[in-house]
Image (tube, coloured by chain):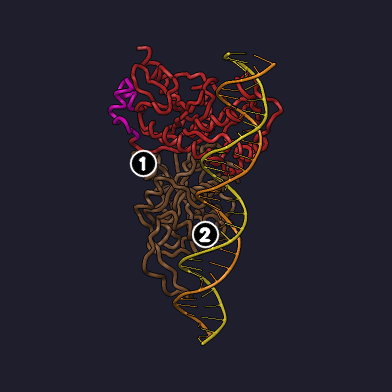
Chain colours: A brown, B red, C orange, D yellow
Amino acid sequence: MEYQKALRQLIEEFKTNFMPSVSLDLAIFGFHDGQLKVLLLRWKGTDDWCLPGGRIRHEENLEVAAYRSLQQRTGLREIFLQQFHTFGDVMRYTNFSKQETMAKLGLPEDITEELVSRDVSVGYYALVEFANAVPTPDFFTEECRWWDIDQIPPLLFDHNDMIKLALKTLRRQLSYQPIGYNLLPDKFTMPDIQQLYETILGQTLDRRNFQKRMLGYNILERLEERKTGGAHKAPYLYRFDKEKYEKALAEEILFVG
Amino acid sequence: MEYQKALRQLIEEFKTNFMPSVSLDLAIFGFHDGQLKVLLLRWKGTDDWCLPGGRIRHEENLEVAAYRSLQQRTGLREIFLQQFHTFGDVMRYTNFSKQETMAKLGLPEDITEELVSRDVSVGYYALVEFANAVPTPDFFTEECRWWDIDQIPPLLFDHNDMIKLALKTLRRQLSYQPIGYNLLPDKFTMPDIQQLYETILGQTLDRRNFQKRMLGYNILERLEERKTGGAHKAPYLYRFDKEKYEKALAEEILFVG
DNA sequence: ATTTCATTGTGTTGAAAATACACACTATGT
DNA sequence: ACATAGTGTGTATTTTCAACACAATGAAAT
C-alpha cells in the first residue's frame, strides 16, 4: 500500500532528523469577529481532533522549531508565540485510554505504538489574525480548521487540558504585558483593540475606562487620520509606538487585568 | 582507571533507563535567617559550578522525576516545586563556549561530547527550608553547597540565566498565589511569614499593611497561643487553614505584589 | 518594684487607582 | 432636517494602597 510505505518512510525521517522523546504542541488562537477560536486537526479517516504539533530538529533551537511548526500550519510568520508549559505525564490520555487512542488513529499497530510512544511535550500558544491564516493539514491529518473556543469537542491525548492552561496563561499575560502588535492591522481604532482584549478575556469592558488605561500605558500613538466608511462618527486611528511597546514588553509594567 | 570505567558504566545506564534528549534543571532556593540562597554543585576537580539537574526515566512522569532529583540533592520531600520554563537553545553556553565548557569538565573528550550533547531541559524551581536540607553531590560533582543569591559566580551553561528567570517567576507567583505552607513551621508568627515574603521579594514591607493584607486573604487562622521566650511582647501564633489555602492555590486569587 | 526598651496589636488618614456614570459630538441613512 | 448609533471627553464615587501614630506587652536593666 502506497500510503503505508510513505508513512514508514516519514517515521524513518523523523528518527534521523529530529530529537527523540521531545515534541511540541501548539494552541493557536485566532481572533475574528469578536470570537476566539482555536485551530484543530482531524486525523485521516477518523472523527478525532487534536492540536497541531511538531518536532525539533537536531541543531534547531526549540523556539525556532515552534515557529516553523506554526508556519507550516498557518502560513504565518512573525507572530505572537509564547511557551506556557511542558507536559510530561506518561499517560497523557484524558479523554481516551491509550488503547482507544491508538485504535482511533486508524494506523497499523506497530506504527501507532511508535507514534504514541511517550514524549515530553512543550506547549506553546500563539495569537494570529484569523483572516490571514491558511489552515493546512499535515501528513497524518486531512482537515485543519478553526473551532469556537467554547465548542471544542473532546480531543485526543490531554489536548483539552492544554487549551485550558494555554488560555489561562494568555489571560494572565494580558495583565502584565501589552498584546496586539501582530494581531491588529498597522492602524487600528480604539474599539478594535478593545474588542481584542474583550475577546481574549471573555468579558466586556467599559469603553471609556479602557481607553483611559490603554492611553496611560503610553504605547499608542494617535494619528490625525480617522477611520472612514463606518455608519457613525469616525473614530481616530492609532498605531503602536514600536519602541515604547518593546520597552513595555521588556519591563513588564502592569497592564489591564 | 577505575573512575573512567564507572563513568562509562553510568553513561550506559543513562542510555538504557532514561529518556534521551530531555533533562531537567533545578533552581533550589533556600530560605534562612533573612537570606535567600541557591544550591549549586561543583564539578570534580574543577572550580566550576552549576545547577543540579536530573533525567527522566522511561515511564516516569516529568514532575515525579523533578521531585526525585530534588530529593536526591537535598533529602527533602513534599516541598514547593514549580516548573517555570523549558530551555531549548542549541548553544546554551552563555558564560563559556562549548569547547571551554567541555574542557572545564575535565572528562575524556568522547565522554564530554556525550554529556554536553544538546538537550531540551525543563527548569523547575523549589523553595526549601535551608536548615532541613542535606546538600548532597552526585557522581559528577564533589561539592554541593548554598550560595547567597547575590554572590553567584559565573556558572556553566546558561545556568545564570536560569536562576534569574526562576527568581523572576517565583516573585511573580507570589503575587497571585500563597506561599509558605511547607516553608514555615506548623505554627508561626506574623513577623515570621513577613520575613519569608521580604526575603523572596528582596525588599522590606510595612509590618502593619502586610498583616492587614495577609489576614484579608483569609487563609490564616489565629491561635490563642502566643510565642513565648522572645525578649519583647509575645506575638500571636498563626496556622494555615489548609482547606482555604488549597482553595486559594486553585483559584489563584490576587496576592501581595 | 519600677523603669526601660524593642517589638507587637490596632487603628486613622490621605493619596492614588479603579469603577461607574453623563453629556456633547459626528457621520450616515431616512 | 432629523434620528440613530457609535465616538470623544469629562466628572463623581468607590475601592484600594501606602504612610504613619500610638497604646500595649513582656523581658531585661536598674
For the point 63% across and 24% down, which residue is it?
Answer: B233
Badge 2: residue crowd in 10 Å (few <14, some 14–19, many ≥20): few
Disc 2 is attached to a residue of which chain? A
Q: Position of residue A29 (x, y in %)?
A: 48, 54
| Residue B166 on image: x %, y % | 45, 35
Q: Residue A61 — which label?
A: 1
Residue pictured at 43% horizontal, 56% vertical: A180
Residue B186 in view: no
Residue B62 percent across, percent down from the top left: 51, 34
Q: Nearer the viewer, residue B245 or C12?
A: C12
Compared to residue B51, the image places residue D28 above or below, namely above
Which kind of residue does numbered mark 2 sit on?
Asn
- Residue B82: image tag: none
Residue drawn at the location 35% of the way across and 41% of the way down = A60
Q: Earlier in the sequence, mark 2 or mark 1?
A: 1
For residue B253, which quarter of the picture? top right
Distance between the Cα atoms at labels 2 and 1?
42 Å
**Residue interval drawn in magenta:** B92-114
Quarter residue B47 falls in: top left
